[in-house]
Image (cartoon, helix red, strand yellow):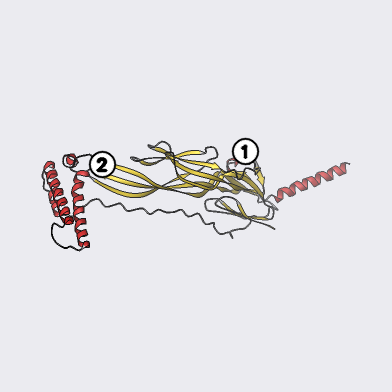
Amino acid sequence: MKRNFKSFALLLALALAGGQLNAQFTTTFSKNVNPGQHSGFYYALPQTMLRLDFVIEETQCEQGPLAGYASNYFGGKDYAEYSSKEYKLLDVTMTSVAAPDPNATFFVNVNTGRGAGKVDFDLLPNGIIRSVGVGNAVQAAETEEVAEFPQAEPLPMPKAKSSDFLTMMSSGKSDAQLAREAADKIEEIRKAKLNLVSGYYETAYVPESLQLMFDKLDELEAEYMSLFMGSRVTQTVVRSIYVIPSKEVATQTVAKFSESEGLSTGSSGMGSPITVQTLPLNVTAAINAPSQSAIESMSYENKVFYRVPEMANVKVTFRNGTLVEERLPVNQLGALLMAPLSNTRLVFDTQTGQIVNMRME
């Protein structure tokens, strides 16, 4: 009886020793790695980051040097009383970008002992896992292209095309005198335009020449009017904001926008809030995945984590209206699962963390 017990104990010890020797690596959640544990490396699964590109029209309003006399000669208040900026939201586009997920980052402790065997891990430069057991034969996944909006050149500031205009402004006269002369000049230009189109000059101009002369007079009038009304220079710009959808917060205030201050990120700026609402479609609800606490509290031998992404409806809203709405995969809303490695080769989708190819040998 004692001999049988000793034999059983010896077999058990050999089995345990064999299991330890066959353990090629151990995977542990990154936050539970002991400081100074260097016999390994980190890898991450991708999370979905949203890039919102806001197309904004910016207008710089400059006060005219004779603005104080605008109401005297032209009435009303259709002039720039002070220099300011105006903003108009034209369009928004949304694209997804893969980034390493800090809540799905793991440490692989490599066993360098006897019988540990060999396994190849292939990672992207940012640490996202690409393959296991394949080496570097997998080509880098193509990243999703983001539409680039051309930056429109600012319209030129009004410039003088007439020697009379330059002479008048550099004459050293008082503002009141300059205002009177400028108003008279505008009246002359308007009469010339009227005479041109009414046939007063009794000259048979070809249509192209007539249009050219009219445009020149119109341009000259705008130059003199800018002395009273000021100038407006408009350009179109694109500003990008990155948003990470969260399981805990379905609706996030990501920016604010106002016509006087433009776009500000976060929720503390001026203007009306811009929100991103992420509603999962529960595609992965039937998957019995381990809890986050279980993943974080344990180590796993010869296993790697992968992810089944969740589909979600993502909507960007502003002032009770929808700016853009799309249905797309949001990785961090999905399920984290484990894949055992036993003579297995795995290839991962670097945009989602899903296994896209598996080969068992």
Q: Quadrant of residue 12?
A: top right
Question: Which amino acid, mark 1?
Answer: Ser
Whether 204 is drawn above or below 148: the answer is below
Measure how far apart labels 1 and 2 are at the Cα level. 57 Å
Between disc 1 and disc 2, the foreground one is: 2
Describe the element under mark 1 as helix, strand or loop.
helix
Task: Mark 1 or mark 2: name the one nearer the start of the chain.
Answer: 2
Question: Which amino acid, mark 2?
Answer: Ser
Is 341 left or right of 67, judged from the image as shown? right
- x and y percentages locating residue 165 in the rendered image: 15, 51
Q: Residue at x 84, y 43 (%)?
A: 6
Q: Which residue is mark 1?
A: 293
Say which quadrant the N terminus sits in: top right
In the picture as drawn, the residue positioned furthest to the right comes out as: 1
Q: Residue at x 86, y 44 (%)?
A: 4
Q: Quadrant of residue 148?
A: bottom left
Is 214 left or right of 110, judged from the image as shown? left
Q: Which residue is mark 2?
A: 83
Q: Residues within 10 Å of mark 2 (few under 14, many from 20)?
A: few
- x and y percentages locating residue 353 in the rendered image: 58, 50
Q: Nearer the viewer, residue 318 or 204?
A: 204
Residue 26 shows up from this direction: no
The mark found on residue 320 in the picture is none
Total labels drawn: 2
Q: Nearer the viewer, residue 88 or 304?
A: 88
